Image: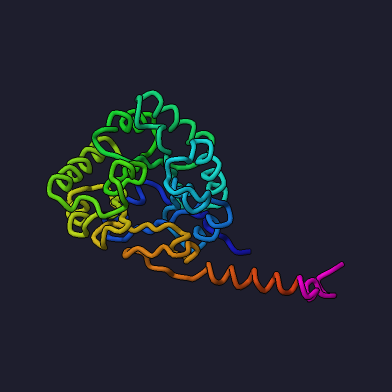
Amino acid sequence: MSVHKPIKRVTTSALRDMKARGEKISMLTSYDFSMARAVDEAGIDVILVGDSAANVFAGYETTLPITLDNMIYHAAAVARGAKRAMVLADLPFGEYQGSTEKAYEAAVRMMKESGAHALKLEGGEEIIDNIKKIVQAGIPVCGHLGLTPQSIYKFGDFGVRAKEEAEAEKLKSDALALQEAGCFAIVLEKIPAKLAEEVSKSLYIPTVGIGAGNGCDGQVLVVNDMLGMTKDFKPKFLRQYANLYDTITNAASQYVADVKSQDYPNENEQY
C-alpha cells in the first residue's frame, strides 16, 4: 500500500520564501471549477479570480460592471477546484474605494462566502487605511499598481503607465506604502520593465508582473488569453501557449456537420 503525502497549499509565507530563494512565482486567472482544477494540476502557484471575468466571461468592455456577488460566485467555484494553489480573489470596483467599514465588510464577506485565501485590491496610498483595516482582521491582501483596470476611465486608455518620472515616483512610493500596510505581494501591470525591476528589488514582499518585464518575482496572465481563447487580443506582453479558439470552433463545426448528416450518434453511442 503506497503512502501519499498530503498536497501542500501555497501560502503567503511560501511566496515570500520563493522570492527569497529566487524562485519565480507562477499565476494564472481562472473563473470556474474546471479551469481551476486543470491549472492547479499543472502546478500553478496562485490562481487569480480576476475581475477580468467581466471581460472574458461576461463580455463587458471594462471590469467595472462585475459585482461582489458575481465575484463570490466565481471565487467559490475556483476554490472548489484548487487543491494546491493559493486562490486570490479581486474585490470589485466600488466595494473598497470608499469607507473603511464598507471595505472591511466586503472583504469579510468575500472570504467567508467564497473560500478564497487572499484578496487583491487596486490602488496605493489613497486606499491604505482600508487595506490596513482588512489586514488587521487577518485577511491577506495583495496590492495592484500600474495600469489598474478599475480606473480605466481616469487613465483614458490601456497604455503603459508610469513612463513619466512623476508617476513612476508615485508608484515607487505606493509600493512601499502597500508593503508597510501589510500587503503580502503586489501585482505590477503594464509599466516599464526597468521600473518594475527597481520596485521589485526595493521590496521584501514579492511582485508579480503582467506586461512589466522579467525583473518581477513572478508573472500572471489571463488564462483565456494565454490559451488563445480570446480572439484578436494580442498585446505585446502576451505569449499564447495554445490556439483554443480555433480548436473549439473546428470541433463545434465538426459536431454540427455530424449531427446534420446523422453521423452522430452512431450505434456505439446509444443505449
Residue 137 placement (x, y as % from top left): 38, 29
Residue 172 placement (x, y as % from top left): 18, 45
Q: Is residue 261 magenta?
A: yes
Furthest-left residue in view?
Answer: 165
Where 254 sits versus 158, above or below? below
User: Residue at position x 40%, y 37% from top?
Assistant: 93
Nearer-the-camera pick, 125 or 56: 56
User: Residue at position x 53%, y 40% from top?
Assistant: 70
Q: Is residue 185 visible?
A: no
Residue 33 placement (x, y as % from top left): 57, 52
Nearer-the-camera pick, 48 or 41: 48
Quarter of the image with the C terminus is bottom right
Nearer-the-camera pick, 211 or 84: 211
Q: Is residue 115 left or right of residue 167?
A: right
User: Residue at position x 49%, y 70% from top?
Assistant: 243
Which range is magenta?
A: 260-271
User: Residue at position x 57%, y 60% from top?
Assistant: 3
Residue 146 placement (x, y as % from top left): 26, 48
Colour scheme in use: rainbow
